[in-house]
Image (tube, rainbow, N blue to C red):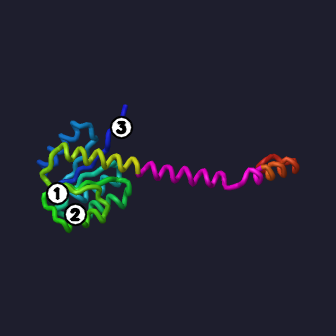
Amino acid sequence: MTRKIKLLIVDDEERFLRTLAQRLTLRDFDVTPVGNGAQAVEIAREQAFDLAIVDLKMPGIGGEKVLELLKKQDPHIEVVILTGHGTIDSAVECTKLGSYHYLQKPCETEELLDVLKNAYWRRVQSKLRVDEDRLSALLDSATSESPLSILRKLRELEESGKPPGK
């Protein structure tokens, strides 16, 4: 059984949020729809998400701040901005803050699905690189002593007649 992609959707337009959540749930995403930025950040503190779709213009905490806070909590989360109020300046700012993609409302479901698929692939690759780096560091620390040095220590222990660790 494959794990569903965990997707956080943040938008203050209730009807749009509900419709998008339904469409993506039908496409096998594990969707958590949220109506405001503060609630989204709180929920993301409590559970991990693979991806997020975030609207820019919302009361309270706006989309740029939500993006910034989500990336701070989990640098590997991929965030797609989906807005009806986009500008070139906001697209540039969101890119600087680490958004994966920036889409204008309305957008075709297939286009959004392609973006989400590619965003998820990037997340997987990013996490694999981190895991490889950790494994490499672990192996380096485990093998930092030369085999000759380890043999010398074993011989010294044998000659002293003491069991290892005593």
Image spot of residue 143 (x, y percent): 66, 52
Q: CA distance from mark 3 to mark 1?
A: 28 Å
Q: Tell me the residue that label 3 is attached to.
A: 3
Report the mark closest to the observer, 3 or 2. 2
* Mark 3 nearby-residue class (10 Å; few <14, some 14–19, many ≥20): few
Q: Does label 3 or label 1 sit earlier along the sequence?
A: 3
The magenta-colored residue range is 126-150
Residues at marks 3 and 2 touching, judged by CB atoms closer than 8 Å? no
Q: Which residue is mark 2?
A: 91
Residue 158 within the magenta-colored segment of the rendering: no
Frontmost residue, 77 versus 106:
106
Q: Position of residue 2 (x, y in %)?
A: 36, 34
| Image location (x, y in percent) of residue 44 | 32, 53
Q: CA distance from mark 3 to mark 2?
A: 31 Å
The amino acid sitting under disc 2 is: Ala
In the rendering, which numbered label is found on residue 83? 1
The residue positioned farthest toward the top in the image shown: 1
What type is the residue that disc 1 sits on? Thr
Local crowd at mark 1 within 10 Å, few (<14), some, or many (≥20)?
Answer: many
Report the front residue among 114 and 57: 114
Q: Give SS at disc 2.
A: helix
Q: Is residue 128 magenta?
A: yes
